[in-house]
Image (cartoon, helix red, strand yellow):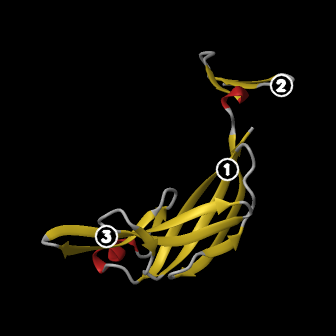
Amino acid sequence: MSLNISGSTITIHNSAGTTKFTSDNKLVYQRSYQTGDVSLSTSSVWVPFVKLQDKDFLVITIKITSATGNPDLTGVLINKEIPANGGVMVDWYARNVNNQPGVDTEILGIDAIESSLVFKTYRLSNWSDLSAGTTTVNLTYYARIWSYL
């Protein structure tokens, strides 16, 4: 194993001389970390957060501690740390409209907007209508900003 450092590049070779790493590979590092508790129902919750920079990306996981949604769903989500990028379904219910089966879902979404994390639930009906969520969700979030050189 060898390490070579020049003015602008770091290179690591294995014992056979094969390059295993070069700093041209965009080294990723954790730039910021924040955790906190959020309780939300029908309105959004804005939490102060670090503003993302050009080379940053956000990874969010959550641990739902309680939720009023369908127990068949919330029962498997409670107290488990799960990825939350892209939204998490927190409620669903089947219904019959004009003798046609349908399902409505409720999604928890988390967005980074300027210097805030925004938590919000929204309901998507069987007909693709979007409305405010009705499920109360209590959670702990773990937000990590990763960046690359």
Which residue of the protein is positioned furthest toward the left in this rendering?
99
The residue shown at (60%, 66%) is: 142
Q: Crowding at label 2, few (<14), some or many (≥20) Cα neighbours within 10 Å?
A: few
Q: Amino acid at mark 3?
A: Asp
Q: What is the secondary structure assignment of the residue under circle 2?
A: loop
Q: Position of residue 51 (x, y in %)?
A: 75, 58
The reply to whether discs 1 and 2 touch (Cβ–Cβ < 8 Å) is no
Task: Give the distance between the C-alpha atoms of the residues marked 1 and 2, in whole angstroms.
Answer: 22 Å
Q: Which residue lies under the disc numbered 1?
A: 146
The residue shown at (19%, 73%) is: 97
Image quadrant where one finds the N terminus: top right
Q: Position of residue 132 (x, y in %)?
A: 47, 75
Q: What is the secondary structure assignment of the residue under circle 1?
A: strand
Q: In which quadrant of the rendered view does residue 123 lie?
A: bottom left
Which residue of the protein is positioned furthest toward the front in this rendering?
98
Q: Image check: 112 left or right of 63?
A: right
